Image: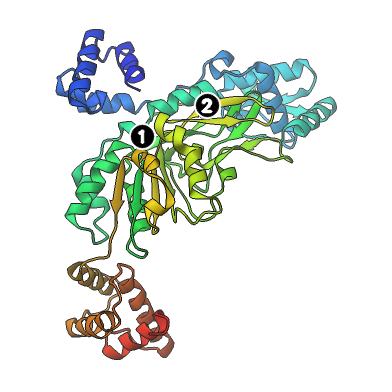
């Protein structure tokens, strides 16, 4: 990434070759990112660098710019128009996400083959022409659908995907202490823990979060997703070896609208989304980390780690998957080290894709029972989330009471600690206040009275919550 980013900076004349070499030399001596070293040397400003790193994919001006063959574009258009009835160039442009000039070239190709024909026009301009599919066109469209039923936006070629993913790399995110504190302000967490989490997130390296259950590991992992700054461009689909791979997932990717008044000339085959946060748990299998080919639709869906590129991938409840932990980790040794993954099409073609994401493994099992020392060395940060102290537990309890509009009573809280935690030798858990208060609220709803903190309600909640207590 150092060479790629540096080359782009020189090409755009943001820095000179000499300045780039000095910044790389400083990076070798002092560490840090290339951009930070350029700023430290006074060769650019943070504002100029941030503007440069927020580049967007330029719209293609010609068929060659798309990386696609005109025949491929024409075939995709024909599949689109099969059920459209009459249509215009603008209708097609909206569907395949390509500029009018390129769509027009594809339509002209189909018209010459007599697969579509002109039905009329409001004006003497091609954009006003109304087209319709012919009988031979319907036959050809159905033949194409038998080969591949994909009829969405035009795909991006693999090289363009690699370049954009590398440009938006998670390694370039800038996380400051204020952003970390703000993101974690809704939960009780020590300053000492925040000081460990901040550098871990900023590094873009893999993180292993472990500790006893019910103390916020999943919450912390999800909160890290809120820290990730800004937005990224995600393609609707890729074309690799003549095969379609869909990447955009409306379940996991959140589209972002451009700000009012912001003029953006972009390649509409890309969608602006929040940095993705993909979470998987016990349902994870090795198959979910490979391309998923649908034998009916005849195209692929991208694996989870590909959908998480430029964002966050959380493996929750690590060790409780349907596969052995060492099998999963062996699958990811190369991607974690080299930041590249390898895929195989059903045709036998192999190709590499970027593995650019912050990976978080979260588990309540002992890490040494799951993985060996060799793999643990490959995980840069290992952070234990332990039971809260009595002070932290009380602060959590107060915050939960306040959130639910229940008056916190110190004497009742002390009664809880003395008669149940101390009396039953149960360790404090960060999730207990929420769950105990939920029991009190459920009881209040049933008996139709306001929820309140009392010794009797604590007794009832405790008996309902714990087994044989």
User: Foreground residue, 143 or 187?
Assistant: 187
Q: Is residue 115 above or below residue 322?
A: above
Residue 267 spot, x, y in % from top left: 49, 26
User: Foreground residue, 180 or 388?
Assistant: 388
Left/right placement of residue 336 relative to residue 202 reads right
The residue that mark 2 highlights is 352
Q: From the viewer's perspective, is the residue at label 2 or at label 1 nearer?
A: 2
Say few, some or many: other residues with alpha carbon within 10 Å of mark 1 (under 14 / 14 to 19 / 20 or more): many
Q: Is residue 365 above or below residue 309?
A: below
Q: Is residue 434 in view from this perspective?
A: yes
Residue 260 spot, x, y in % from top left: 36, 38
Left/right placement of residue 206 relative to residue 129 reads left
Residue 49 spot, x, y in % from top left: 26, 25
> Mark number for residue 170?
1
Which quadrant would residue 139 be assigned to in this image?
top right
Residue visible at 69% across and 18% down? Answer: 71
SS class of the residue under badge 2?
Answer: strand
What is the C-alpha distance between the residues marked 2 and 1?
18 Å
Which quadrant would residue 296 be assigned to in this image?
top right
């Amino acid at each position: 990434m150092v060479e790629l980013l540096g080359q782009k900076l020189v090409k755009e004349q943001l820095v000179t070759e000499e300045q780039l070499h000095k910044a790389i030399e400083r990076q070798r001596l002092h560490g840090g990112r290339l951009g930070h070293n350029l700023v430290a040397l006074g060769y650019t400003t943070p504002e100029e660098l941030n503007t440069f790193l927020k580049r967007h994919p330029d719209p293609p001006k010609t068929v060659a710019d798309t990386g696609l063959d005109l025949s491929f574009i024409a075939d995709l258009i024909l599949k689109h128009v099969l059920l459209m009835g009459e249509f215009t160039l603008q209708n097609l442009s909206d569907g395949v996400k390509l500029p009018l000039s390129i769509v027009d070239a594809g339509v002209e190709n189909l018209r010459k083959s007599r697969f579509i024909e002109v039905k009329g026009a409001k004006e003497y301009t091609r954009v006003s022409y109304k087209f319709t599919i012919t009988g031979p066109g319907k036959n050809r469209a159905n033949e194409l659908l038998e080969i591949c039923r994909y009829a969405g936006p035009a795909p991006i070629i693999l090289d363009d995907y690699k370049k954009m993913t590398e440009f938006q790399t998670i390694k370039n995110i800038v996380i400051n202490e204020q952003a970390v504190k703000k993101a974690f302000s809704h939960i009780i967490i020590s300053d000492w823990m925040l000081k460990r989490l901040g550098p871990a997130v900023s590094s873009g390296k893999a993180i292993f979060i472990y500790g006893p259950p019910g103390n916020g590991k999943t919450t912390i992992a999800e909160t890290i997703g809120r820290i990730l700054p800004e937005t990224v461009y995600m393609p609707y689909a890729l074309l690799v070896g003549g095969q379609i791979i869909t990447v955009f997932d409306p379940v996991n990717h959140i589209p972002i609208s451009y700000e009012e008044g912001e003029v953006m000339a972009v390649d509409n085959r890309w969608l602006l989304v929040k940095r993705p946060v993909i979470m998987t748990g016990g349902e994870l299998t090795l198959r979910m980390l490979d391309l998923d080919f649908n034998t009916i639709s005849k195209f692929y869906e991208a694996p989870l780690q590909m959908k998480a590129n430029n964002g966050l991938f959380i493996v929750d409840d690590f060790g409780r998957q349907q596969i052995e932990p060492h099998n999963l980790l062996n699958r990811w040794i190369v991607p974690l080290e080299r930041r590249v993954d390898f895929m195989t099409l059903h045709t036998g073609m192999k190709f590499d894709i970027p593995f650019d994401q912050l990976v978080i493994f979260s588990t309540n099992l002992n890490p040494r029972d799951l993985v060996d020392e060799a793999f643990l060395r490959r995980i840069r940060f290992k952070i234990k989330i332990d039971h809260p102290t009595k002070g932290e537990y009380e602060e959590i309890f107060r915050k939960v009471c306040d959130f639910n509009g229940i008056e916190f009573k110190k004497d009742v809280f002390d009664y809880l600690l003395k008669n149940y935690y101390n009396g039953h030798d149960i360790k404090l858990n960060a999730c207990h206040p929420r769950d105990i208060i939920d029991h009190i609220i459920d009881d209040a709803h049933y008996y139709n009275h306001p929820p309140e903190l009392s010794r009797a309600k604590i007794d009832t909640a405790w008996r309902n919550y714990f087994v044989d207590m």
